[in-house]
Image: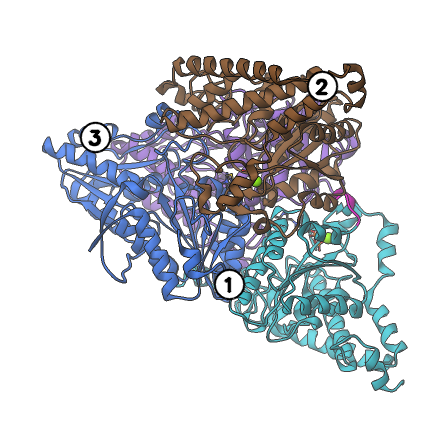
Chain colours: A brown, B cyan, C blue, D purple
Amino acid sequence: MKSEPRIRAALPEGLTPDKLREMYAKMVLTRLCDDRAFALNRQGKIPFAATCQGHEAVQAGAAFALRRGTDWLVPYYRDTCLALSSGVTAKEQLMCLFARKGDIFSSGRQFPNHYSVPDRQIASISSIIAAHVTHGVGMALAFKMRNEPAVVLITFGEGSTSEGEWHEALNFASIHKVPCVFLCENNEYAISVPQKMQMAIQNVADRAAGYGMPGVICDGTDPVVTYSCVHEAIERARRGDGPTLVEAKCYRAMSHTSDDNQLTYRTPEEIEAVKTRDPIPKFEAWLKDRGLADDAMFEEIREKAQREVDEATDWAEAQPPPTEEDLYTHVYASGPLS
Amino acid sequence: MKSEPRIRAALPEGLTPDKLREMYAKMVLTRLCDDRAFALNRQGKIPFAATCQGHEAVQAGAAFALRRGTDWLVPYYRDTCLALSSGVTAKEQLMCLFARKGDIFSSGRQFPNHYSVPDRQIASISSIIAAHVTHGVGMALAFKMRNEPAVVLITFGEGSTSEGEWHEALNFASIHKVPCVFLCENNEYAISVPQKMQMAIQNVADRAAGYGMPGVICDGTDPVVTYSCVHEAIERARRGDGPTLVEAKCYRAMSHTSDDNQLTYRTPEEIEAVKTRDPIPKFEAWLKDRGLADDAMFEEIREKAQREVDEATDWAEAQPPPTEEDLYTHVYASGPLS
Amino acid sequence: MATKTVLEGVRDALYNEMSRDERVFIMGEDVGARGNVFLITQGFMDKFGRQRVIDTPLAEASIVGVAVGAAMAGMRPVAEIQFADFIYPAYNQIVGEAAKIRYRSAGGNTCPMVIRTPYGGGVRGALSHSVSVEALFYHVPGLKIVVPSTPADAQGLLTSAIRDDDPVMCLEHKRTYRLIKGEVPEGDFTVPIGKAAIAREGKDLSVITYGLMRHTATEAAEKLAAEGIEAEIVDLRSIRPMDRETILGSVTKTRRALIVHEDNKFGGVGAEVAAIIAEEALFELDAPIRRVCGPDVPAMGYAKEYEEAFMPSVERIATAMRELAAY
Amino acid sequence: MATKTVLEGVRDALYNEMSRDERVFIMGEDVGARGNVFLITQGFMDKFGRQRVIDTPLAEASIVGVAVGAAMAGMRPVAEIQFADFIYPAYNQIVGEAAKIRYRSAGGNTCPMVIRTPYGGGVRGALSHSVSVEALFYHVPGLKIVVPSTPADAQGLLTSAIRDDDPVMCLEHKRTYRLIKGEVPEGDFTVPIGKAAIAREGKDLSVITYGLMRHTATEAAEKLAAEGIEAEIVDLRSIRPMDRETILGSVTKTRRALIVHEDNKFGGVGAEVAAIIAEEALFELDAPIRRVCGPDVPAMGYAKEYEEAFMPSVERIATAMRELAAY
Ligand SMILES: Cc1ncc(C[n+]2csc(CCOP(=O)(O)OP(=O)(O)O)c2C)c(N)n1
Ligand SMILES: Cc1ncc(C[n+]2csc(CCOP(=O)(O)OP(=O)(O)O)c2C)c(N)n1
Ligand SMILES: [Mg+2]
Ligand SMILES: [Mg+2]
């Protein structure tokens, strides 16, 4: 192994070898949770699963760019790795898959991955695409009004940028220079619709100019590159210099969700081709190349993660479901009928 | 006078000296209609008036760029000169001011200037800002599907570009390369809100890049320049090369409408300053400079227009209002309750 | 007569109308190569071409807004909203624009278009794939709203909707798509907008309902028949215009009215049904009007338990029927 | 007690709450330098600063959406929609988001915010500045909706709304702004959300109404008093939650119910009022329920004649009252 101090000097600001290994561990944990979700779905134990395979690098990179305990995350439904890298545990993740009463995100009310973890600065979202983007801006506005140091990271797919609300959010944010970062996870598809049918441009980042904010493109299969871009954007926002639109180019390794069948709109060749872009082996090579980890360490991390996911699965499955009375809670602060 | 053929060679494609004088006449007719509307409002004869003073040049220029009888116009509420230059008569204009039953735009149902003149290719709009922009795109889509040569001109203020629907319209239009032109009449205000509070950019045209379409800026106080830009954009669309965003820089000479008071948000200096940009004397100088008209001709045009407006006013005022039964017409094709 | 599912009824209406009338086209998310998320338009792109089966960007306001413009220009667009929960961003275009175009232009412009969307729960669609939206639109003059519950009605009402000269919303209960099978007339046929159907005749009480609940209520009625109570089931089919005559005719006959819908109770479509009866047949009633509806909570949850507690069940409906009959 | 207009009541509620609570701020179109198009927030920008009186871009979805986010982050935003007709683009944020945040996160996130908007006709606002929107929202669990009609209620209900821990829509009838004057308590006070008011006591029939129509109906009642008919006027004040007890109490006393609103009849708020009575007090009634409402046409037109034909008048209401009393 090369000596770590020399490596550290070459790492982007804020990243240490330990953090890089933790990042890797989160990507692996996410992959195993993702695989588990689809396995449970096939077994008929859960009705629905959404994958983030192909997005792990951008999400891990972005999550580590946040100042934990301060910055807020307003994610979208594909952000399993962002959530697991921001303090959500495997148990919590499995509880939402099983829609148990104790699911801390929604008490089993929402689809999986619709996080809400205020104590870890993650905001609630619905499934309605792009509706959360203005929320992130509003949160950032609040932090600015209160002179708090928090920055808000708002994520979405490239398809989401077609929605009018997305436009309104970026426009408002740039006028008021609120401390937020817009992160587009561009996987080139909105369910079956390829990017060229969604927009007449190559790069979502090109939309930034229309709001007078910087637009940055990064390789979303590389967590370190994504980290750097998002980190820079976040610190820029924290300094009061306004929002940035970051576009991370990644891909979707599987069908949109367990309800979709990508074979209806993607060629087998394309499906094979994206598999070669898997960010996990790519990051392994990067770490090994720099002497920051070796196969034994990867194996250890993987085994630990597997144990975690197995335990979480058994535990979550055994938890009680909601009851009929739970239907009526949290309608209003004052009760079901106010 | 210089010999007309020489001048003609220097004129933009499609413009003749006669057309230029007609353009001028429409600007004058519009100004007189506008003044009349405010006079009637002050007299308590009509409850509402919206001005287009400061916008006459962009509107006259754009109207003459349309292929009459073929191209469609989807205007907004400030487009008196566009309408009068596209075949709407002074009588029709006054009928809508008085909200008479015979008002061909809406039978007295809508605010003034909410045109709907299908036989002259003008589409119905509501007062809901930017809601008409997707309609123009849909009309263009229809023309494309039917292989018709029509192009659609869609107009709006710079404030309207903040609406999500505006974004969605431009995005759709550029993906499908539908034959339309987006014309922004940028007068720097949305009621009281100055441009810098509406967007973090200098030019609305900068938004075009986000849709992969050309963005063109022109001096909206010059009808010939506006004509050229809009003409080029329209013919580009007609060739199947897709939409263009044209931004015409103009100004608002008065309060937003008869219900507004610009003194609450504009300085007296600013109000004075915009008056110097009046497109009508500017165009007079241009015409005289090229020997295309002289003061006597201007006087004649003005007198004719004044007679037209006076007659139209008397006539329209004398027309019958709607009756209670008219409330129930045109709810459904099949009648009031279908 | 052929036996079809509701989904096939929808597909056949679309297919036939597109074949019959060049002005008809479809636009929506994933309607092209994917053939719609429920596979309703599978094969349409190959048959009718990309121009008439348009995969739109992910932007509902423009799906409806562009369709409105195309309709104004003489086409007959069928705009699809992938799930009813995603119709909210298009609300302005539907309520503020489509519904008012004919009226505001005094007939100068018109807006003959269809907005189709799958709605309703019972498929583990969770908070944002289960909503009922009829009550958010049925108050709006200028719109028509149909809610078919059988394959024949799905095909016949959608065909009528496409041929209608005004904007029509076609709300299809997604649970019925593959669950409900039934006989459908061969060839070209329509079901008129604005006419309810007597799904089951009975003399002891009237159940006024629509959508999936027509089937749940019918099941409850069969149960009660075994106990000697004969319920009449009125399937509204059209929410706007609403068939007052059929409602009042049935209620006047049975003298008891139970209204059933899956949507939340307060301010739901059942409110207007109750109001119509209370205005026009109050003294014909031998019992108070009763409503069995979804609870007044913001959404149907993901967990099975939430869904079951939300959806009016055969048992809940049967109990209400029994009580009403015994009143 | 001071005498104020409704507009002053609204302004004072905003001013006092902004003074009292740093978390309260206002955002909307033209609320800053212009001081709102009705001059409600005149002087606020100078007093509270640009940061707390935000002139937004012309984009309603973001006005509400940004406010939702700020509320989730602990602020108490008051989002203004300039005219109710422009609320449609924000429908997704109100119905799909604000109303569901508490429920969907099982209390993890909340959305304490106010959406205020002037609505209603009678001011020559034409097709797009006259609409009543209450029926488009009152069906939505998770929202509260108040519709004050007097200066004291305007101030007291808006104050309650701002202090409420959930999203509240405050619909202000624009015709009442300067027309309606009345006594308002001094100092800090609130009017509770969810409680109707008996605007006038009477024994012969109940008129259930709200908004501007409270005043029109009261005028009609005064007329009828001269003829010996004493009408009770129930001003709902809150549309959701709705005060069932007061409605049922009044109706049970007078045995006759007339519902009056300016909004279109079919599927309007009156439908739910009628349904509640028909469910719970059917046998207490001596006459069918009756509704006097706006006609079922898409909008109120610009011409005076349209407006007059649309708005329920003192005469129309008085006639209905007379007929109902004589039934
Ligand atoms: C308003 C709305 N419209 C449609 C959908 C259905 N839908 C869910 S995900 C999706 C595609 C999203 O694409 P993108 O934003 O690129 O994100 P990705 O799934 O590719 O990560 C669609 C159309 C939705 N959830 N919300
Ligand atoms: C959806 C909607 N929101 C708000 C308004 C109120 N309003 C009418 S005109 C206007 C300003 C429009 O500004 P701009 O688009 O720049 O056009 P201009 O009036 O300057 O020509 C506003 C806010 C409206 N009519 N519709
Ligand atoms: Mg994508
Ligand atoms: Mg402007």
* Residue pictured at 10% horizontal, 30% vertical: C227
Looking at the image, is B1 positioned above or below residue D154? below
Q: Which residue is mark 2?
A: A291
Rounded to the nearest angstrom, the CA distance separating label 1 from label 3 is 47 Å
| Left or right of A251, for residue B210 | right
- Disc 1 + disc 2, Cβ < 8 Å: no
Give SS at disc 1: helix
Q: In the image, what residue type sits under mark 1? A: Met
User: Residue D269 has which mark?
Assistant: none
Q: Position of residue A30 (x, y in %)?
A: 55, 23
Toward the viewer: D203 or B24? Answer: B24
**Chief SS of the magenta region:** loop
Residue with the mark numbered 3: C318
Q: Is residue D87 above or below residue B97?
A: above
SS of the residue under disc 3: helix
Q: Which marked residue is nearer to the observer: mark 1 or mark 2?
A: 2
